[in-house]
Amino acid sequence: SKFTDATHVSVESISGYTGDLAKVLPGFDGQTVSTDVLQSQISSLKTLLDVTASGAESIVDQVQDLRVQYQQAADQAKAYGLDYQVILDKGNAIAEMTIANENRKLEQSDQSVQARYLAATGDQEGADLLNFDVSAAQQKQELDDEWRGYLGDSYASSQTYADQMADLDKTLAAERLKIQATYAAQALADQEEAQQEAAEKQAEYLSQAQSSVASAFSNLADYVQGLGTSDASPLSVQDQYKLANDNFETDYQAAMGGDYDALTRLQSESQTALSLDQQWLGSGTDYSKAYQDMLTKLQAIGNLGADTFTANLAKQLAAQQVDATLQVNKSIQTMNATLQRLILMQAVGAKQQKAA
């Protein structure tokens, strides 16, 4: 561009602008216009076009304008022989700080989104720590801004500022550590709870297994005990008669003492004993006496009432819960003892038949 007179300029091209303003200003190319009009038009267009959606000039444009203003001031200072570099440095420092502040806001906004993602995907500790770090950075920046507004750029040399920043750093560190400690304690508690639940579950499985094994051996012991008086027994009728009455008498005495297991066997044992009594004693007076004796004993059991058996059964069940292994061993011992007794009676009976 060149001046045609003191108040007019012939425009060749206008450059150095960006955005919508850069699209409009080339309309002046090739025209001769008043310098006042040109400056006024550029100023008006800049005000109208070089703004963001919020109605304010963009940060980048603000920084650029700031640099231009300080450059112009530096050029004037240089013309008068002043230290223009101080002015340039000041402008650059303000521009860099403005850009840094905006970048920090954008970064913190992104970190907040990241924290929300962590929370949504189950990492609440990570989310809380990231949110805390964003808040901590903002608090420190606010303290810096307050002191800069109070003392200017020399605020960093203030001892009071240094003390306050140290207090803030110390407090923030303690608060962050507390967050970590809280989650660590919760994680430990959750782990211990999980281990306790696993141990309880394992103990429950073991108890169930031991109870099942004890029941199996108990049933096997009953079966072995019944073998001696069954149709498959090799014992003579006399030996079966003795065995059946011995079995009944043993459980009768135990039942009189409150043994619930013995009580449950009395019905079948009394039936077996009476059947063999009739076979061995016949249908005469001896069988009648045995029959009456059986009724008397069963009546005695009935006279005990339910309380005795209920109390003893409760103790028995409690003992099984405490030591299920003991119950398994007891069932095995009972079965083995019954089996040995049956084997012994069979051996004696065989010897007697051979001697006869």
Image: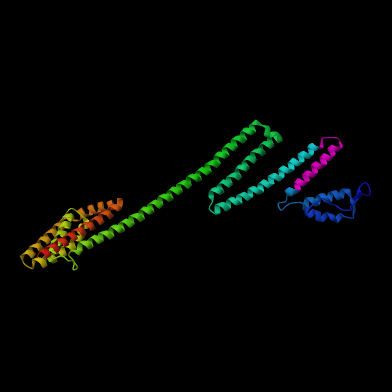
Residue at 84% in and 55% down: 26
Q: Between 331 and 256, which is closer to the camera in this rendering?
A: 331
Q: Does the segment drawn in magenta span residue 342? A: no
Give the residue at the far front of this rendering: 355
Q: Does the segment drawn in magenta span residue 73? A: yes
**Left or right: 153 in relation to 324:** right
Residue 246, horizontal then vertical, whole percent: 14, 59
**Total labels drawn:** 0
203 in relation to 287, above or below: above
Residue 296, horizontal then vertical, whole percent: 11, 59
Residue at 56% in and 52% down: 118
233 in relation to 310, above or below: below
**Left or right: 138 in relation to 23:** left
Q: Looking at the rendering, which quadrant does residue 268 occupy? A: bottom left
What segment carries the magenta color? 61-84
**Left or right: 304 in relation to 69:** left
Q: Between 37 and 137, which is closer to the camera in this rendering?
A: 137
Chief SS of the magenta region: helix
Q: Looking at the rendering, which quadrant does residue 169 occupy? A: top right
Residue at 16% in and 55% down: 253
311 in relation to 98, above or below: below
Residue 288, horizontal then vertical, whole percent: 8, 65
| Viewport quadrant of the C terminus | bottom left
289 in relation to 141, above or below: below
